[in-house]
Amino acid sequence: MPRGKTASSLDLPLPATFPLAGNRSKRDCIVDAIRHAISTGLLPAQGDLPSSRTLAERWQVSRGTVEAAFDQLHSEGYVTRTHGSGTRVSAIVPDSFLPPPSSAGGGRGPAEKTADAVQDARLPAASPDSPVRAGVPFVARLAAPELLQQSPWQKHSTEAAKGESAADAGSTPLRGLESLRQQIVAYLGAFRGLSCRPEDIFITSGIRYAIDAVARVVLTPGSKAAIEDPGYPGARRIVELAGASTIDVPVDEHGMRVAELEQHPDVSLVYITPAHQSPLGVSLSIDRRETLLDWAHAHRAWIIEDDYDGEFSFQSAPLPALKSQDRHQRVIYCSSFNKTVHAGLRVGFMVIPAALQPRVLALWQTIGSPVSATVQRALASFMASGDFASHLRRSRQAYQQRRDVVLRELDRHAREHITVTGSHAGFHFVLWLNWLKDGMDEQAIVTQAAAAGIELQPLASLCRNVSFGPAFIVGYSALSLAQARFFGRELGSILRAHADLAAC
């Protein structure tokens, strides 16, 4: 094809996997087909893609499915999208974006790398074979990659790399670079009401790494840990790998029912998400915070505070971190820049009480520092310059806009059939189905939504012993506004149709 000529829809082969897609969605098949067309030159650099309407008609899929594929390709750097000008192949497609040739060794493609980059996402995908990632409605519960302005971040990264000597590369302090820990201390004081010292900070590669480290130093085979129900399955698995058994503590509209811990005086560790509970989205009430802290002090137990999206409160200033009220030093505070900056950054941190620090240092001496000094230096510079605070403000506004668009479409099309909770903050909310009775199966809705390119996760999949009415977890943070609008409308229409059918 001559350079610059627009490929027709007939030039792009129909994805062969469509008839027997198995566990792969049609959107993924479209993404693969267009990636292949770009890498082989069928779609040249700066060439226009066929319109989403044209491809949808050619491939007999919904236009929204094609739009979702285009948005993912845009987030990965393959294409650019300009309002009024359509979708175009990027002028320069980096080699790292091109799929490697298949080999007996099992080469890993971009989609697999993206899946690795977001494995610290707070909620699991609808199925183990469908990882949480940007652009997938409504499991897109992670920091939106396109919100990180590349020019400032690249500047800080380049300066960090230039300033690193060979001696620096081999002598990263076990706790992490002092410059980054100082910036984190200032950030926590300003944004989370938490006062601590640089020596209390330990740099990690994310919250799961932090949970694993704490589990290793405070749990022993046969010990017990309390986990929220419903809650984050990753924390449960990590605790069990440490040889501990888990106690399920129910969550209601005020957060974990901490009074029930009195029935378990032998619990050594409590894992909790107090700011925006995962998945219900509620905040732990003030009185329960005090009760939990007093209980931990009386029983010499430790608390992991997972503050996974505490920065993103849309209606009012969020409550200070639980750690800020910790008079007896029983709380290990964990957070992650993977949630605030980019899922692929792989940098998090813990605030460790002084009594635990020797044990954590001993562990770090064994396994080594988990984050490169160059990345830490770049992040410290990013924070010190004010670019990080600007990014947080921009992200908060973008996530609120996306949430509002989804809520508006759901309200417009299914208002009388649904109730929404937990929408005041974070990356997701809970969508309750008013017409279904407790115990009724939501699978028919899940199946129809999947046919429209929507992945839904029932709340029941995150419950252990508790039972709630039929509901779904709706993630919106890593959707474009166009996706939020289109798929919000699609989901609202699906819900209304099912509710009307049930009423007949």
Image (cartoon, rainbow, N blue to C red):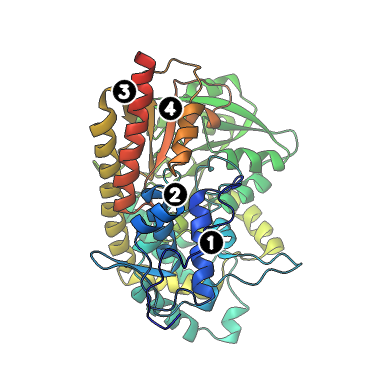
Query: Type of residue at label 4?
Result: Ala
Marks 3 and 1, how far apart at CA:
37 Å
Q: Nearer the viewer, residue 213 or 98?
A: 98
Q: Position of residue 323 (x, y in %)?
A: 43, 44
Q: Secondary structure at mark 4?
A: strand
Image check: 445 left or right of 373?
left
Query: Type of residue at label 1?
Result: Asp
| Mark sitting earlier along the chain (2/1) | 1
Which quadrant of the view contains residue 244?
top right
**Residue labelled with disc 2:** 60
Residue sitting at 58 percent across and 38 percent down? Answer: 233
Which quadrant of the view contains residue 499?
top left
Q: Secondary structure at mark 1?
A: helix
Q: Is residue 295 above or below residue 62?
A: above
Marks 3 and 2, how far apart at CA:
31 Å
Can residue 203 be seen here? yes
Q: Is residue 427 above or below residue 83?
A: above
Labels 4, 2: front one = 2
Marks 2 and 1, how far apart at CA:
17 Å
Q: Position of residue 306 (x, y in %)?
A: 48, 44
Q: Nearer the viewer, residue 315 or 442?
A: 442
**Residue labelled with disc 4:** 471
Labels 3, 2: front one = 2
Q: Nearer the viewer, residue 370 or 152?
A: 152
| Mark sitting earlier along the chain (1/4) | 1
**Residue labelled with disc 3:** 417
The answer to whether the residue labelled 4 contacts the one labelled 3, judged by CB atoms less than 8 Å apart, is no
Query: Type of residue at label 3?
Result: His
**Residue labelled with disc 1:** 32
Labels 2, 1: front one = 2
